[in-house]
């Protein structure tokens, strides 16, 4: 599948998520479920009850695979750029930490997500947050702007991850930090999953092997590339995930694939420095 076809499919998929306010990135039976389900998912991946309370209703869609803000050590007055900012959840958490003198820029390629994020900005009265339409492979941000770049379960969706990290490097100030939570592979996926656009939108089939992912970060020029944490990605619920319904295979086959994938995919938190 060509890069533009992938981007269009991902954009359309996340437009639907924005409209239905559901979770389709973290593979749980509650995908596209209720607020309680989203809260459970968010706490499972590292957010606190306080985090969930301190953002506008509708900002958290349960789309992450970690909590990059908890690892970012943000300081007052810093500028943060969020790659694939969605409805603004991490941006709003960052805004509280950088304060009135700080600045948070969220970038997303899905207009429906931007509309939702901007509504949430107005609801929360965030004067230090803005959202820009753009692709993370071509960031609408000037050189040497950010003190820190964050991203949460988004870079795996890009068909050109090397370009994403090159753009992140360009936008960071010298000495700036990169903190990302993402999905990577320990071994290649079965072809039936690798070629599924539904699995791509679900943050699975677009993922790189772990070493390839880290090599892309180093190749962009980053130093001190470190894995802060990694955990197995829980895929035992794959057979009940909505995307699985579109894979056109029997439940026994899906169960076999789920068992294979349960030791193949991990969530990692990575830091690096420009």
Image (spheres, helix red, strand yellow):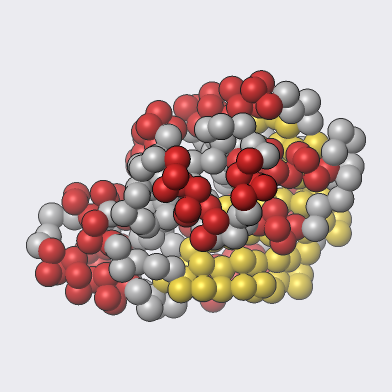
Can residue 118 be seen here? The reply is no
Pick the residue in front: 223 or 96.
96
Number of dots carrying numbers? 0
Looking at the image, residue 71 sits to the left or right of residue 77; the answer is left
Taking the view exactly as shown, the residue that stands out farthest to the left is: 250
Q: Position of residue 139 (x, y in %)?
A: 64, 40
Q: Is residue 250 above or below residue 160?
A: below
Q: Position of residue 71 (x, y in %)?
A: 72, 61
Residue 33 visible at all: yes
Q: Residue at x 38, y 75 (%)?
A: 264
Measured as percent of width and height from the top left, residue 183 is found at 49, 63
Using residue 96 as the reference point, say whether residue 63 is left or right of it: left
For image coordinates 64% across by 37% down, the residue present is: 55
**Residue 58 falls left or right of residue 270:** left
Above/below status of 168 relative to 205:
above
131 versus 25 height, above or below: above
Q: Locate the C terminus and report the quarter of the image it occupies.
A: bottom right
């Amino acid at each position: 599948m060509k890069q533009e076809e992938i981007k269009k499919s991902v954009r359309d998929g996340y437009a639907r998520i924005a409209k239905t306010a559901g979770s389709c990135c973290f593979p749980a039976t509650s995908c596209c479920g209720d607020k309680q389900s989203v809260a459970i998912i968010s706490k499972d991946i590292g957010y606190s009850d306080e985090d969930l309370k301190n953002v506008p209703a509708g900002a958290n869609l349960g789309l992450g695979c970690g909590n990059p803000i908890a690892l970012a050590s943000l300081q007052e007055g810093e500028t943060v750029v969020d790659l694939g900012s969605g409805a603004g959840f991490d941006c709003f958490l960052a805004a509280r930490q950088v304060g009135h003198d700080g600045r948070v820029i969220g970038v997303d390629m899905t207009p429906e997500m931007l509309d939702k994020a901007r509504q949430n900005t107005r609801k929360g009265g965030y004067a230090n947050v803005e959202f820009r339409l753009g692709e993370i492979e071509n960031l609408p941000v000037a050189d040497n702007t950010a003190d820190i770049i964050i991203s949460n379960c988004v870079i795996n969706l890009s068909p050109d991850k090397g370009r994403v990290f090159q753009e992140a490097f360009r936008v960071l100030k010298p000495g700036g930090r990169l903190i990302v939570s993402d999905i990577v592979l320990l071994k290649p996926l079965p072809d039936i999953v690798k070629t599924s656009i539904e699995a791509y939108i679900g943050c699975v089939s677009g993922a790189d092997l772990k070493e390839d992912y880290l090599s892309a970060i180093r190749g962009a020029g980053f130093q001190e590339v470190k894995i802060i944490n990694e955990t197995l990605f829980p895929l035992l619920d794959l057979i009940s995930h909505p995307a699985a319904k579109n894979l056109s295979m029997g439940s026994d086959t899906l169960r076999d694939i789920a068992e294979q994938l349960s030791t193949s995919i991990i969530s990692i938190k990575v830091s690096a420095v420009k």
